[in-house]
Amino acid sequence: MNIYRYEQNPLITPADVTPYHEGYEVIGAFNAGIAKYNDEVLMLLRVAERPVSGDPAVVKAPVYNPETNAVDIVEFRTDDPRYDFSDPRVVRDVRESTGFAYLTSLSYIRIARSKDGRHFTLDAAPFVYPSNRLETFGIEDPRVTQIGETYYIYFSAVSPVGIGESMVSTKDFVTFTHHGMIFGPDNKDVLIFPERVNGKYYALHRPTVKSTGSPEIWIAESDNLLYWGNHKHLAGLRQDMWDSGRIGGGAVPIRTERGWLELYHGATKEHRYCMGALLLDLKDPSKVIGRSDKPILEPEAEYEKNGFFGDVVFSCGALVEGDVVKMYYGVADTSMACAELSLQEILDSLGTRW
Amino acid sequence: MNIYRYEQNPLITPADVTPYHEGYEVIGAFNAGIAKYNDEVLMLLRVAERPVSGDPAVVKAPVYNPETNAVDIVEFRTDDPRYDFSDPRVVRDVRESTGFAYLTSLSYIRIARSKDGRHFTLDAAPFVYPSNRLETFGIEDPRVTQIGETYYIYFSAVSPVGIGESMVSTKDFVTFTHHGMIFGPDNKDVLIFPERVNGKYYALHRPTVKSTGSPEIWIAESDNLLYWGNHKHLAGLRQDMWDSGRIGGGAVPIRTERGWLELYHGATKEHRYCMGALLLDLKDPSKVIGRSDKPILEPEAEYEKNGFFGDVVFSCGALVEGDVVKMYYGVADTSMACAELSLQEILDSLGTRW
């Protein structure tokens, strides 16, 4: 696979982002949804901000308060035996075997704009910010699907009651309408197809299951983008392969002559995140007809290997121009990068094991 | 609370049910959805059957095979260190901190019919039986909502990829149409309201969340009963109360003058399951306006305290005649019972803590 990583990588780093909250530091500007709007490329960045802690023995957890529209801070002492602070992203309740009690940063969506797709200028303020009780721990990992002149932006809505997927829509990237939670918890990595197939809208989604099963990709259908059903399991983990630990949709599905191309992320149980591809039947996207035996992109560059959470490449959006796939992707849960790949080469590389 | 348990309780026990599968034993006939059809009361029983094991050192797990339409049996030796057999209902993978790898029984839906609501005659064959790859571990805990002349029957669809909620519909309880999975995994305890509210259908549902949060009740809306969205968190656990461990919807919501009455189950962390009530705003069912401080029914009778999984009362359906609520309920994950309560007394008992 020929991969051309931009010389400008990383395109946006936390150092490029002025914190929105006073007394906070930006620790991530990553996992951006991508849109073409007028003559510009927009990155809808997930910006993660953390309250600055002067005391290494104190961990702070920011929580959006929908009643005051401000962010409260919950403080923990690192010697508190009720909590586990070993993962810098979260505060865990030691009585719980899975999951988290608090996040140590608050994420929201902020736009960076570019004429050439390489040099970006950041908006001064957030675009989509937590606004209700399903978003009190923040909103994460947006994707953007353009249908006609409307851009649908959907993201993980995180709160103490779970992680679901909520959606807003905009025509101008200035104002938007909030459509509530479209996939209930636990769910993330939703990808809405850019056109109807056989009269139905389709979306990939990634339930996080507790009873049995693994973090795998499902597909659902809709007739209005707001209500979803006919859920089917689409693609699972593959033992001893690069996507043996967890998988989830990445970029908005791309229509090709051979099928719907989905650039998805897969991780090993050791949390090494790579990007690969799934090919879905053009007329029935619930059928997988091709899948990458090997990743199309894996963490190799320094900015992909090192950061807040290293060894991660994680795309939430790509642009296609002729044979060129411009895959934008978050690196190390920290910054944004872009690589160009050949559409034909990706399609030719797909294996038959799924 | 005045409770009149039928003298005929338990109304149906496993001993009343001839196994459908050769070489199996019926271990449960419980958690039945309830319908009035013509002049009869129908119990849509969850019947659980288990392969008979002649050898106490062997545990058998039945798995429906959609390709052959037969049930395969996976055998385990109880000294296999990879698995944990301590819960008789499941086989656990010792590497996983939550959930299960296999079930030790296969459930399906079978109808029992009655003229008086107390004496039931069982159908000879299943009504709804696993039929696809989302149902290979069985179908469980059906509920029935009548809308016009159509009965919508929805149930937990269990398979190695998770537990979701699937739906069929019937007009005659002989043939039915399968509508696929309406709530993706992990989800159960769905309850569809019997009429539109402000032009929308509503359903309660109970996601099982892994990332953060607890097994609690959510509400969603729809315009066709098949596709669901606008998910909102409705009611949570209450510390140190009878519903501190998990909650989920029970009977189909009942329209009263004071609001939508939902008879729901709550359990402590020690898995003692009781029934209580929630009152929801008539015009906006996403608003809770009353909730039981104490259970309206708790496991007290011998058949409620002892069985396959004791100390459980678990209703999936009730009939209302004037002031009389005939609450049918599964007991001890084994059999079916019924108790009559006063609608007025339930409404008057609702507290203001939720």
Image (cartoon, coloured by chain):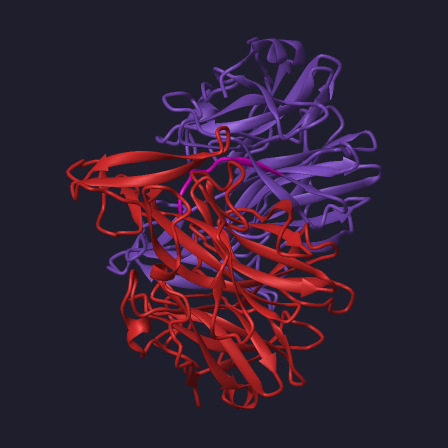
Chain colours: A purple, B red
Name the quadrant containing residue B337: bottom left
**Prevalent SS, magenta region:** loop
The answer to whether B83 appears left or right of A189 in the picture is: left
Asked if residue B101 is positioned above or below residue A94 in the image, the reply reads above
Closer to the camera in the image, A34 or B170: B170
Residue A285 percent location from the top left of the image = 66, 29
Name the quadrant containing residue A115: top right
- The residue at the point 73 percent across, 45 percent down is A225
Residue B229 percent location from the top left of the image = 66, 54
Residue A216 is a magenta residue: yes
Number of marks present in the image shown: 0
Residue A146 percent location from the top left of the image = 77, 36
Identify the magenta region. A210-219
Asked if residue B311 is positioned above or below residue A3 in the image, the reply reads below
The answer to whether B310 appears left or right of B250 in the picture is: left
Q: Is residue A40 visible?
A: yes
Quadrant into which the N terminus of chain A falls: top right
Closer to the camera in the image, A232 or A323: A232
- The residue at the point 60 percent across, 69 percent down is B40
Residue A275 is a magenta residue: no
Q: Is residue A181 visible?
A: no
Asked if residue A88 is positioned above or below residue A135 in the image, the reply reads above
Residue B113 percent location from the top left of the image = 53, 65
